[in-house]
Amino acid sequence: MLHQNRWFNAGSLLVACLLVAGCSGVGLNQAPVEDRTAAGSVMPPQSAPAGHYIVKPGDTLIRIGLETGQSWRDIAAWNQIANADVIEVGQVLRVVPPEGGASPAPASGVQVRPVSTPGSSGTPAAAAGRAVTPVTVSPGAANPSGLQLMWPANGPLLAGFNESTNKGYDIGGNAGDPVFAAANGHVVYAGAGLRGYGNLIIIKHNDDYLTAYAHNRSLLVKEDQRVERGQKIAEMGDTDADRVKLHFEVRRQGKPVNPANYLPKR
């Protein structure tokens, strides 16, 4: 009986310790968040006010621009950010133009690290040798905008849109195949600064819509450049990808939407 009581007491102590640890809010793999209460600072709000965004761990201005449907240069200008590489977790950023003002001209004085556009390691022969599984395109809700896009590449559809696992279309092809602008617009990003997208181009078409073109071997346009529907903007590649392909996204006000609603049927 005494032996059993010792085990009971030890088990009770272990449970109490676990409860205390749970109440303390400490968890495994918890992302570090800067404590901004020190030195008279005020903790950021739990939710951002309208037209604003709260910086999360791992964010960059490029990713914030993609998620909000804005140019990262505009966001830098609206928030008077001199160095695009210096933003803080918890920082509240304006992501819409100031009231009564139009979008400013690109902030040419903003500093950002130059990014390289490395060549693809894939080859046409290697890409052609991979099996392609046909993908059924399922249209979503009707397109209320009237925006009509052309297919940005001629290859087969490898993967369709899925809000939880794929934010756009994956289109197959060979290294060096042309990638086309899906509609008229201006380039708001061209580079390799967004993890998971490789060499990336983002084109803004109007106040609501932008398209993204990822994993390219080479980029043929620059930021702030006007492009026309059907213009060759890149060459297909496999940068930051497991095979040669184009990852294509359509975003409405920063939210990924089903490209099937905007592309003609093949």
Image (spheres, rainbow, N blue to C red):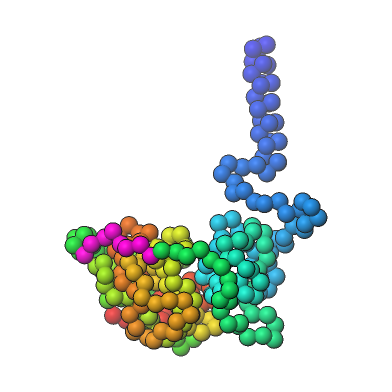
Quarter residue 54 falls in = bottom right
Work out whether 239 lies above or below 102: above
Residue 239 among those drawn in magenta: no
Q: Tell me the residue at 34%/83% (across/down).
A: 231
Task: Name the spot of residue 20 as percent of width and height, x first.
Answer: 71, 36
Q: Residue furthest top?
A: 2
Please give the range of residues in magenta: 117-124
* Most common secondary structure along the magenta stretch: loop
Q: Tell me the residue at 70%/31% (across/down).
A: 16
Residue 120 among those drawn in magenta: yes
Q: Tell me the residue at 56%/68% (across/down).
A: 111
Task: Name the spot of residue 161 as percent of width and height, x first.
Answer: 40, 69
Task: Name the spot of residue 215 as percent of width and height, x first.
Answer: 36, 65
Q: Is residue 215 left or right of residue 143?
A: left
Q: Quadrant of the C terminus?
A: bottom left
Q: Is residue 14 left or right of residue 262?
A: right
